[in-house]
Amino acid sequence: MRNFEFNHLRSREWGLAAVILVLSFLLAYGSRTLRLNSDSAISPPDHTVLLIHDTIELEDLIVIMDENGIRFNAGELRWASEILGWRRFSQGRYTFDEPAGYSDFFSKLALGLQDPMPLRIPPGATKDALKERIAVQMQFETHELEEAMRDTSLLNRYGIESHQLYGRILPDTYEVYWTTSPSRLLERLLTEFESRVIQPYADRMQELGRDVDEIATLASIIEWEARFDDEKPTISGLYWNRLNRRWRLQADPTVNYAKGERSRLVYADYRIDHPYNTYRMHGLPPGPITNPSLSSLRAALYPEEHNYMYMVAAPDGRHAFSETYAEHRRKSREWTDWLREQRRIRAEMEREEALRQENALEEKGNN
């Protein structure tokens, strides 16, 4: 009887242990299943951007996630990767603004479902600066963009030469993918220029008797010359007056371009022997000196009608315009006299400050 009771008790204990073991397994399995299907297993900081330069394995992804401050359970992440079958992840730029579940997170990176990004192209950049500004935002390098800009197959498709390309890179913010190739990006920019400039203003260019590259070249000079948009049509009208009267254009920005830097010009600079120096050459230079904005292109297309032939930059960045050389000389002297007076005032202030410091040191020494 006692043996029976002992065996019965032992059977109940084993049964209870088995139940506990099964329940523990079910709880563990259920917990992990819940975590696997949770939509907040991975918690990135606000607006996290992951840049993956090449196809990578899970351990490389874990390093990138750590570097970007993403909160996750590494062991569970590895388990989820095995269960879901996502082990390799594609290059790309991926943004995360809220917590994500394992399935959504892994599939987005594995399938290369990138998020578009804003590519900002500024106006009036030098050619080197423009290339660097574009490349630093994209996955490709500057030299790769340079090669694409010299690709004759691309240039021939749009009927242009490499030096004309810069005038057709319209400044704006474009939505692109980070891994877009240089060639595909240039195709996008050239298509954009065609739809926003060439097609809408084709009749106006025909009316002026100028092709699109001549307009882009003049607009690029206006871009560098004008600091304020409201002055652009006036400056355009002045340049058109010179061109129509067969004067030399005598545009300072073209001398800066020939010189290779934007800086204050001296007399010797105007004598530089260069095809872009419009103080020496007649007509427009061979191509654009920068990428003009839409406002500069419109100014070149629709110049203000006036009789101005001369201008001089004022201290505030605006310009004083004149019809005659005598008037121009007078306004230039006014500007020169103002600069001379400002230099005199600054020198006087510096002398007074130096004297004050000298007196302060002398007084300190006496004490």
Image (cartoon, helix red, strand yellow):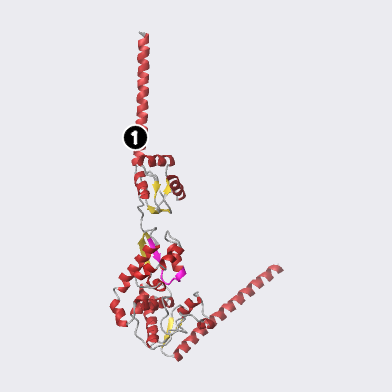
Question: Could you tell me the amino acid type at mark 1?
Answer: Gly
Numbered range of the magenta stretch? 118-128
Residue at 34 percent of width and 76 percent of height: 212
Q: Which residue is labeled 1 in the image?
A: 30
Toward the top, the furthest residue is 1
Give whichever of 307, 336 is nearer the camera. Answer: 307
The percent position of residue 256, horizontal first and vertical second, equals 48, 77
Q: Is residue 215 visible?
A: yes
Q: Is residue 170 visible?
A: no
Instruction: Look at the picture and state if 59 lies above or below 141.
Output: above
| Residue 197 lies in quadrant | bottom left
Tell me which residue sits at (69%, 71%) in the image. Answer: 362
Q: Position of residue 1 (x, y in %)?
A: 35, 8
Quadrant of the drawing holding the C terminus: bottom right
Task: Please name whichever residue, 11 or 228, is drawn nearer the observer in this view of the structure.
Answer: 11
Q: Based on the displayed image, in which of its 4 quarters is residue 185 positioned?
A: bottom left
Residue found at the far front of this picture: 153
